[in-house]
Amino acid sequence: MTKGKFGLSLAAVAVIAFGFTALRQPQSVLLVVGFALLAEKDEWLNRQAMQALLLTIAYYLAELVTGWVFGGLTRLFGLVNLYGAASAMSTVDSFVGDALYLALIVFSVLAVLRVLRGKDAGLPFLSKMTDGDIAAAIKSKTRTATASAQTAPTVQTAPIQTQYAPPAQPPASFQTPPAVTSDAPAPAVRLCPACSAPLHEDSRFCTECGAKAE
């Protein structure tokens, strides 16, 4: 048989885990599982220890649910003075509890027999949970979503070009009328014959030099 890091047989550790499961010792099962996961760190042993732990959890959950159901019915029938029905529910509760414990022993013994031959315990449904099918499915979905996001084509958007429209022409009624130009010649400027200074139209003498204007 394969031995672990501490010289213990891995199959023997797995058998101990299922033995504590059959004896309904959940604390001891937790200790063995912790030793397997934290100390030995062997993949095969981890699978067997986890199956023992899951089998223990499933048993106690089933026992709790059946206790609530049949125990509640027993108390209900007792309150309404149906003592015969209450006694029947109590008997059913006891029978279901014995059946669950018998199933726990059967599964534990089958797991021990397989483990002693170096095989996997192979407990129904529990072995699939220890295989990590759920975690593997979640990881595969995450990888698929990531790959699809990476391979998705990128959409390139063309730059937006702003077109400037010419300013609107104001209505004809608001347009400024064109300037009126006159083709008449400008009047000639009189100059002083002596100093060439400009003279007023009605000036007879130059205001600059005093010469007589012609």
Image (cartoon, rainbow, N blue to C red):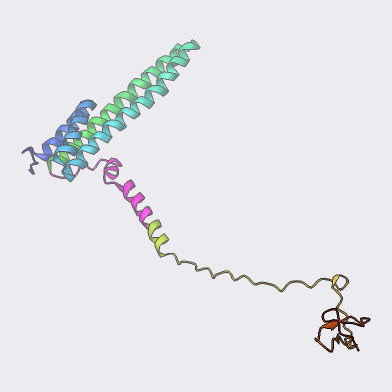
Q: Residue 65 versus residue 86: which sits nearer the camera? A: 65
Tag count? 0
Residue 161 left/right relative to 16:
right
Return the residue found at the far right: 202
The residue depicted at 23 percent of the width and 38 percent of the height is: 50
Above or below: residue 208 compared with residue 132: below
In the rendered image, the quadrant that contains the C terminus is: bottom right
Residue 55 left/right relative to 43:
right
Quarter occupied by residue 120: top left
Return the residue found at the far front: 210
Spot occupied by residue 27 in the image (x, y as percentages of width and height): 22, 26
The residue depicted at 46 percent of the width and 66 percent of the height is: 154
Return the residue found at the far left: 7
Q: Residue 96 versus residue 177: which sits nearer the camera? A: 177
The residue depicted at 34 percent of the width and 29 percent of the height is: 61
Region in magenta: 118-143
Residue 126 in magenta stretch: yes
Quarter occupied by residue 17: top left
In the rendered image, the quadrant that contains the N terminus is: top left
Q: Residue 35 versus residue 121: which sits nearer the camera? A: 35
Q: Main SS of the magenta segment?
A: helix
Above or below: residue 204 compared with residue 88: below
Residue 58 in magenta stretch: no
Spot occupied by residue 24 in the image (x, y as percentages of width and height): 23, 25
The residue depicted at 20 percent of the width and 41 percent of the height is: 46
Spot occupied by residue 186 in the image (x, y as percentages of width and height): 88, 86
